[in-house]
Image: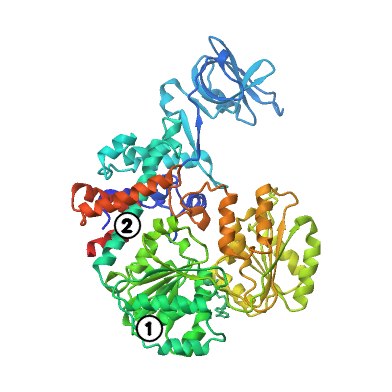
Amino acid sequence: MRPEGLAPLFSSAETLTGVGPRVLQFLQKAIALPPGITDPRVIDLLWHAPHSVIDRRAEPALDEALPGTIATFAVRVTKHSGAPRNSKAPFRVTCEDETGTLTLVFFHGDPRFISRQLPIGETRYVSGRVDLYGNSLQMTHPDYIVEPDKRDTLPLLEPVYGLTAGLSPKVLQKIMRQTVERIPALPEWQEATWLGERAWPTFSDALRSLHVPTDTDDVSPGGPGWQRLAYDELLASQLALALIRQSHKAQRGRQVTGDGRLRERILAALPFPLTGAQKRSLTEIEADLASASRMLRLLQGDVGSGKTVVAMMAMAMAVETGAQAALMAPTEVLARQHAVSLSDLAEATGMRLALLTGREKGKPRREILERLEAGDIDILIGTHALFQPDVAYRDLAIAVIDEQHRFGVHQRLALQAKGHDGGANVLAMTATPIPRTLLMTHYGDLDVSKLDEKPPGRKPIKTTALPVSKIEKLLDRVRVNVTDGAQVYWVCPLIESTGTSELAAAEERAAHLGKLLPGKVGLVHGAMSGRDKDAVMAAFSAGDLRVLVATTVIEVGVNVPNATIMVIEHAERFGLAQLHQLRGRVGRGDRQSYCMLLHSDRLTETAEKRIAALQDAKRGDDGFWLSEQDLVLRGGGEILGSRQSGVPVYRVAEVPGAQDLLEAARDDARLILERDPGLQSERGTALRHLLYVFECDEAVRLFRAA
Ligand code: ADP
Ligand code: MG
């Protein structure tokens, strides 16, 4: 159980004053939430670090004020100059100190309200940007006007947060100030000497000063506070991994030695033979499952390399021995697609397959859970729903995690912990090549199988780039091809047009295409309900719809072999890895496929290079080469790789020097467990708090079992 003292951090953001349903919705958009969490909690807000501060500490005399800068002044009000009625002229308030005068300018303000805030003869602190108008100093709409005895309420260093439309800085700041009140005092989990050497503050102080800074360093990723939090997070994840390794060693795995009968049936039902790489990976998986220790294996294979069949065969091994298997995917769409595409194979072989996502609720969900616990389901496919607390498996032997980089360590653990004796064999799958160091941070030691050979008969996708001014040509080509029977994906990066924004709108595009091809165009986007999404996907899959306009919801894993044309609008807005993944939705059958990158007429140098890389005749379809190029083009600024995967794996650890911190954390974790394998010492108890703060709950649980 999570220690009582941490409860305030994990309470819902709705417990804060000013957070009602509307603000909650804005927060959901503005704040990065860990996968599986939909309602922001206090801790999620606390991890929403400001990206900069407004420095109001300068308090010059008026004759020393620097025009164009932000400053705070103590001034006396001398005059109100009201605008004549109905005129557009602003209301002005003249102020002075011993050295000069300052005019405060208000457009469309209520003069009575302003006069009350700034009564003649009184002293006020005003803070904002000063400018020179002719010879006189002006401040238009001061950010703050406070009375002398309330000076403390003026934030001399004001944090600036990433926002979303509808959420104003002042509202968010007010919420943030409350979250800071919820930070509990916690036992120190870092070593005193280590803290002393680096002059790091306590966890609570570091987190507090991130939101109530007293120095610009407090909100800088290179500053001592942030560095400490980064180290805390890295230590938590390294400790969690070390605990997994420890419990791996301590416990035997669920040994799986099937007789091959189900696998034979699968092979007979497949319309193709396995590639050499698929066979090799399966031999490796078989050996892992047959051994007494648990499997932790990563299956790496570029998009379209055929990972799903390998997963199905691996799951069949478990079912052959009378155990169960689970397949977890990061999105509802993908989970459903897996369930649909694998249900034929399951039926052909007599395996009982079921689907469990956030959408299965009430009675249907209860029924699935009952059958699962009774062992009447052999393979369960789903999303995060697969590891919720009330989900119990009769005998889970293998957990397959598709697109593993979309999940955090603890989510993987949570599913794994549902297994036999608290630890299922794990097969993690990815299309994104991951550097070795990054693998270490996410897994510690693990084995890797590579699908380095694509199924035969695939023709390389022909990739061309086209400036958006030539779109008519493209539309015409799409119309002709669709009339000839082709199916087309059309990807746009946003849902609604945002007035002046030049971003293409998926909705508008769908309407436009629908006029050219009546009744043949569908639209999917992230804001649609799951059911609606399914209906459109199914219609496209069945060929009733010929063009699927989509936001990036189709990015991951969707498989419609008949689709041969991929159009990506605003290609310059996507990363290289993402473009490659998107493009991988076509070229899955034996017909020639095409990818059209539609880009703005003017490209940055980097965007141009990215687009050129995808068209590279020799290596442009090699996902491993492309991801190397991606790193090169980004200037290698990113160390821990969370941006590469598209989902932040760490909440605060992306800081300068992270690589060094990571290595230190790895050594520290190893040492901690050597000295105190049961985390029983005083520091051990504190470290349990650390694990809970960073939501490695499952690791603590595992470790208790050890
Ligand atoms: P990914 O590795 O991207 O998940 P999938 O598993 O979705 O790829 O497979 C892509 C396509 O290739 C599917 O249509 C699948 O049926 C097909 N496929 C998989 N293995 C082979 C094979 N050995 N020979 C021919 N086609 C295959
Ligand atoms: Mg896949």
- State the SS at label 2: helix
Q: Quadrant of ligand 1?
A: bottom right
Disc marking residue 240: 2
> Residue 314: percent from the left, percent from the top?
42, 78
Q: Which residue position holds label 1?
A: 319
Residue at position x 79%, y 55% from top? 469
Percent from the top left, x then y, of residue 127? 52, 25
Closer-to-camera residue (483/633): 633
First in residue order: circle 1 vs circle 2: 2
Rendering quarter of residue 538: bottom right
Q: Is residue 34 visible?
A: no
Q: Residue at x 29, y 59 (%)?
A: 243
Left or right position of 431 against 238 = right
Tag count in the figure?
A: 2
Residue that appears at 50% across and 81% down? 342
Query: Which part of the image, by quadrant, shows the N terminus?
Result: bottom left
In the displayed structure, 273 sits above or below 43; it is below
- Few, some or many residues within 10 Å of mark 1 (<14, 14–19, 20+): many
Q: Describe residue 473's horizontal placement relative to residue 565 as left or right.
A: right
Q: Residues within 10 Å of mark 2 (few under 14, many from 20)?
A: many
In the image, residue 55 sits, relative to residue 689, either above or below, namely: above
Q: Position of residue 577 (x, y in %)?
A: 58, 59
Instruction: Classify mark 1: helix, strand or loop.
Output: helix
Please, what is the three-letter code of the amino acid marked with disc 1? Val
* Residue 389 against residue 284 in the figure, above or below: above
> Label 2 near label 1: C-beta < 8 Å?
no
Taking depth in this image into account, of 258 and 422 the one nearest to the observer is: 258
Q: Amino acid at mark 2?
A: Ala
In this rendering, position of residue 217 left or right of residue 240:
right
